[in-house]
Image: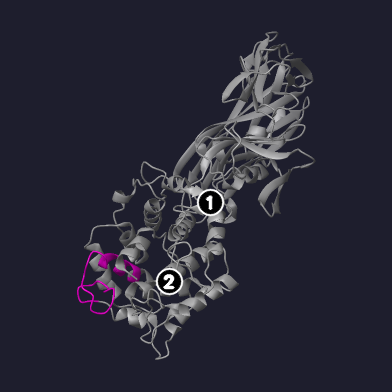
Amino acid sequence: MTKSKVGKVAAAVGGGLILAGLLFSFFRPAASTSSAVLYLKSKPVSPWTAMALAAAGEASDTSAIQNVTGTNAIDYEAPILALAAAGKDPRTAGGTDLVAKLKTFYNNSQLGDTGILNDDIFGLLALLSVGESQTDTAVAGTKTFILSKQNSDGGWGYAVGGTSDTNTTAAAVMALIKAGTSSGDAVATKALAYLVAAQNADGGFPYDPQSKFGTDSDSSSDAWVIMALRAAGRDPGAQKSKDGKDPIAHLGTLLTTQGYYAYQAGSAEDSFSPTATAYAVIALSNKYLPVGTVTPAAVRTTYRIEGKTATLCRGEADAHTALDVLVAAGKDCGVTYHVKTMSFGSYVDQIGADKEAGSQGWLYLVNAVQPSVGAGDYSVKSRDDVVWYYGDFAWLPSRLSLGQTEATSGSPVAVTVELFGSGVWSGLGGATVRAGTTTVQTGTDGKANLNLPDGSYQIYAEKDGYVRTNTVGLVVGAKTQAEVSLSADLVGGVPPPGGSGSSNGGSGSTTTTSTPAVAFTVQSTSGGSSLNFGSITSGASLTRTVQLQNQGQRGIVLESNVTGDDLFRNYLYLDQRTWRMWRALLNQGESKNAEVLLSVPSGISANGTKNGKLVFWATPAP
């Protein structure tokens, strides 16, 4: 192989977070890697050397590769892999989302240059190194394309339809295994057989065992094959030639006193030497591509699940994809769902009791727009609004707004209902606005007025052929309010034994000035006006209980709100439901206990003392 072509391959390769070592029997200490690491440290940082240093457990400055630009897919693949190797998400490490840039080069079923195969292979490795799903359109399509281009001898070539070579074949083996292909699969078995057959008597490997330009072993090919064998679960030290020599031993013979690995025996140092050395460091560090992956951080989104006849759930969730909100709904509201797998892919065919039928089924919107990819492939952004709805593709989204959310007795409340079409919101006439048992129709301008008796209402609107609107809370008349304070210490380490924190503090009950008709109290069942969860770690859950008592002259409807630190706003539940969906009816003189659950997901690391308030309010029961 010419060094220029090796350089092109190197430009498309990177790594990820350091994985745990392979099976111990595969480990062969390489005393020589220390001098090679020192050699790499003495050179300017490139994507490839950064990945190699990370594989060797060394840090490097990746600032120079965080904001790359390019006109080809391959221009982004190396920086993505190098940043992942350093534990940085290429989506957010610099000012540019490199993963999104790379995906712009995916066209139909192929990534990058239509005549080149290596950018597909390393593009697949790059996407997988940053946690992209195997069902992602670009990932799945590129994998299929690579599989379709395997040569009859089991190998792959640098170009589409080109002669097989050991370097490209080894990279393809690693990419396909990372993408879910078993090392025992016929495709992988055939590729590995091609590699093994290419071994020279000296234990090393050539770039092309059939090349008319020479078939001598070289350090780059040794390294590629060693990595591929490890990825397939094989011990490269046991891969003996007919003379009983192995590629690890041969690679060791190419280490120079200056610390670099010569391309071939007797090769002088040149501009490619750092890249060849980086290959060797990866291979002799018992690593293979991608060395590891980085998982994108979940972002906070709002969501609604709109079923056939009612809103099934609404709230906020930490999510990576639009599909994640269904997982959140399961926890927030007990909503179940089912994903159906077909030859063309997977889709959600049922949420709750509502199952696809005829032309209608489950679809989703993000910020009122219907994405062109599956929900599992759509990466959400912070504060995106995700709506799952039961309907068909022709339905347009709608929304509702109120002129006020707290009205005095007898005052009309203005309602506006709008539809989203052609990129703009406009009035939706003929929509039915529902407020308890009261309904009104919007005029042609999408407006209406509500005149309601005192009470608490959840207002929404619907019209055949449109997605149901959001729900807005409305209180008419006096609102009696009570609250308890919240506190917790988010810490590292092990949660307190039995999952309990320190005792609840405070004394007395919390009440507010109220009318004789509507009055209630709330207090901790341990006594007092505060809920102290004590020490809690990420991944842990703790519960407390409050007692609510109706002391008024009529039944009341209780609702809740949470203020203060995001720890409570995001992860507090009442009676196993998100506080946003919690509602309770208390008859005159009735009391009830409500379970208050603080459930902190894994990965939350903002340690310290957190404070908030759990607010209850009451309005007369309808």
Q: Which residue is drawn at 77% across and 23% down?
A: 555
The disc at residue 370 is none
Please name the residue that numbered disc 2 is placed on.
Answer: 165
- Specify whether 274 is left or right of 359: left
Residue linked to disc 1:
138
Q: Label 2 sits on what residue type?
A: Asp
Give coordinates of residue 353: x percent, y percent. 78, 42
Please tell me how crowded label 1 is: few (under 14), some (14-19), or many (20+) other residues with Cα within 10 Å.
Answer: many
> Is the residue marked by circle 2 packed among few (<14), some (14-19), or many (20+) residues within 10 Å?
many
Question: Mark 2 falls on what kind of element?
Answer: loop
* Residue at point 65%, 23% (across, down): 473
In the rendered structure, does residue 270 fall within the stretch colored magenta? yes
Give how far across and how far down residue 615 sits, in percent: 60, 29
Main SS of residues in magenta: loop
Left or right: 248, with 127 as reference point: left
Residue range (magenta): 256-280
